[in-house]
Image: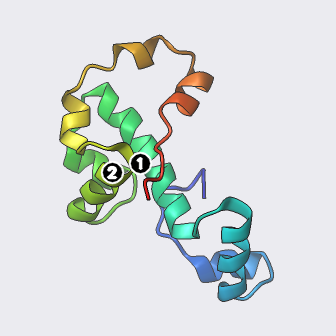
């Protein structure tokens, strides 16, 4: 899921690979990671979207589709929930401090946080 974040989520196929039913896989995934497979995937997509938006050479719509989302509205809503600002506001904001961080620290520093 981390590598293929732009691909559609196929829980039954993941479950089959893990030799589990889809329901059992989803419950086990949530127990292990603290969130559903879909929420986990969306968090990975938003992490990647943040990196693309910081570059500034793609529009919000282009970023939406580049990370595997098929609905701009859903992408914008989830981005705002996780990041605390809209994708366009995030793209417009200066990100100089993030650029000075090493890549390994930047990923930790810029990871979207789940808001209740």
Q: Mark 2 and 1 residues: CB-CB less than 8 Å, in contact? A: yes
- Distance of label 2 from label 1 (alpha carbons): 6 Å
Q: Residue at x 60, y 52 (%)?
A: 2
Q: Residue at x 23, y 25 (%)?
A: 93
Where is residue 64 shown, x and y percent of the image?
29, 52
- The numbered mark, 2 or 1, whose residue comes first in the sequence reads 1
Above or below: residue 27 compared with residue 42: below
Above or below: residue 86 compared with residue 106: below
Asked whether, in this view, residue 43 is left or right of residue 16, the answer is left
Asked whether, in this view, residue 30 is left or right of residue 49, the answer is right
Where is residue 59 shown, x and y percent of the image?
19, 40
Q: Residue at x 39, y 58 (%)?
A: 68
Could one spot residue 6 in this view of the protein? no
Q: Identify residue for label 1.
A: 46
Above or below: residue 78 compared with residue 96: below
Identify which residue, 26 or 60, lies in the foreground: 26
Q: Quadrant of residue 89?
A: top left
Q: Quadrant of the C terminus?
A: bottom left
Q: What is the residue that sits farthest to the front in this orientation?
A: 116
* Residue 79 tag number: 2
């Amino acid at each position: 899921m981390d590598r293929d974040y732009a691909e559609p989520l196929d829980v039954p196929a993941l479950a089959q690979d893990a030799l589990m039913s889809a329901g059992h896989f989803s419950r086990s995934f949530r127990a292990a990671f603290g969130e559903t497979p879909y929420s986990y995937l969306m968090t990975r997509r938003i992490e990647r979207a943040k990196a693309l938006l910081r570059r500034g050479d793609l529009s919000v719509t282009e970023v939406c589709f580049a990370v595997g989302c098929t609905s701009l509205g859903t992408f914008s809503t989830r981005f705002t929930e996780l990041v605390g600002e809209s994708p366009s506001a995030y793209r417009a904001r200066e990100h100089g401090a993030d650029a000075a961080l090493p890549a390994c620290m930047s990923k930790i520093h810029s990871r979207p946080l789940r808001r209740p």
